[in-house]
Each structure stands twice: as C-alpha cells, then as structure tokens.
Image (spheres, helix red, strand yellow):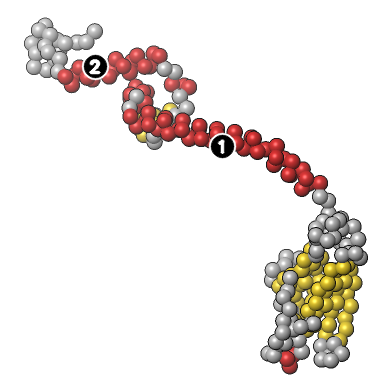
Amino acid sequence: MVDRQNRVGSKFGGGGVSSSQNSERERKERLRELALETIDLAKDPYLMRNHLGTYECKLCLTLHTNEANYLSHTQGKKHQAGLARRAAMEAKLARQKGETDVMMPMRSTTTARSQTKVKIGRPGYEVSKSRDPDTNARCLTFELHYPELDDARNRQPRHRFMSAFEQRVETPPDGNYQYLLVACDPYETVGFKVPNEKIDRGEGKFVTNWDVEAKVFTLTLHFLDKLDKGQPSKKRTREE
C-alpha cells in the first residue's frame, strides 16, 4: 500500500493527491521489485559488482548504485541497443566459423601434402678455383649434384647472394665476406662463403648451367681485378 496521508502540504488523515512525479517513482519501484522476483541476476553475464559495493554493466560501461537501478538500466534503450549489436556480432562470427569449418578439410589436405615433403639433405658439391687465362682474374666454379630430384625439367636450383650482416650463423658478422646461397626443394639450402668483392657481370664472366639429364647445377663467377673495379664489362648477363 502507498502512504498517501503523510504527504507534504496535506492534512493528517486527509490522504492528499499524488503528484505525477510521485506516481512515476512508485511505478518504477513496483517494476523493480517485480523484476527482482522474476530475474536471476546471478546469471546475468554483464552485471559485475566492484570493490566499492556498486554495480557495473560490462556491456554499456555504466555504474549503478544497487541491483534495482541496474534492472531499470537493462530495460533502457542504451542497453537494448548494446544487446542487439552483440547479437549481430555473434551471428557474424558464427557465419565466419561455419565458412572456416567448410574449408578445414581442404586446408588439412594441403597441410598433409606439405608435411609429407621430407628434406633429402644437402646436395653433393665441388668447388674449384682458377684464373682467367686472359685477365688473370680469380675465378670460382661451384658444381652441385641433385641425383634424387624429381621432375628436373620443371625444377631448377636458384641462387642469390647474402651479405654477412643478413645471415645468423656466424657471429659477429665479418664484412669481408659474403654468402652464395643455392636452393632446390626438397634438398636443403647450401651456402658458400666467398670474399665480399665486386663480381664481374660481363658477358661470359658470370655463367650458370642446369644439366637436366645429369641433374647437375654449375655456377661460375669471376672477381673484378682491383684495378678494374671502376670499369666493369659493358655487356652484362641477367642474374637469375
């Protein structure tokens, strides 16, 4: 029962007229009491009680003095809009998860195929030093053997040069040297430590050859003479 006789400005025993503000306050209070009886706040994932004894809504990041005030907040537009956004996001994630589950068999097959590739090991190699008969420039020839390579016509060893500061094998790096890397899957990549000097890219001075039948890769390079470093050969071959 609502006490209507002890109101400000009314005579004792006369009851008095309830204002619109008091009626609205009483209506909200009745709704809160009803909600407390029907809703189990222990199962609300967004209600959190902090160390100050007040309540926080983790969805809207709002602060509330008591449970009744929080229940009133849950019926407001802000909380309902937050619930709608949350539901839309979860539905989107569920659709993405469904698409991922559909693609999993194909991905697992691809992964299984990639895992079946076992490295054979390092290829056999030979390194020979010589001098150019015309210029007396130093010359290095690398010969690598890949006897167990399948489909040699479509697979060819690749090479590149790596600086001493790029590698992580020898520390501290020595700037006087560089590394020649040769790779051909499923063999392991091999590296050769060579002097960090200018290489002659002129015609016939830097040559690579891949023998498909013998499965032998050959690379020959010439170092520029110190007197000719500023004047390399005009004709150059394209490096792979």
Report the residue marked by disc 2. Answer: 26
The quadrant of the picture occupied by the C terminus is bottom right
Rendered location of residue 82, percent (x, y): 40, 32
User: Which of pointers 2 and 1 lies earlier in the amino acid sequence?
Assistant: 2
Give the side of residue 109 with respect to residue 61, left or right.
right
Task: Evaluate whether residue 6 shows in this view.
Answer: yes
**Numbered disc 1: secondary structure:** helix
The quadrant of the picture occupied by the N terminus is top left
Rendered location of residue 40, percent (x, y): 44, 18
Rendered location of residue 216, percent (x, y): 88, 67
Q: Amino acid at mark 1?
A: Gln
Viewer-nearest residue: 105 or 50 = 105
- Counting the numbered discs, the total is 2
Report the residue marked by disc 1. Answer: 96
Q: In the rendered image, which quarter is residue 232 located in?
A: bottom right
Q: In the rendered image, which quarter is residue 29 located in?
A: top left
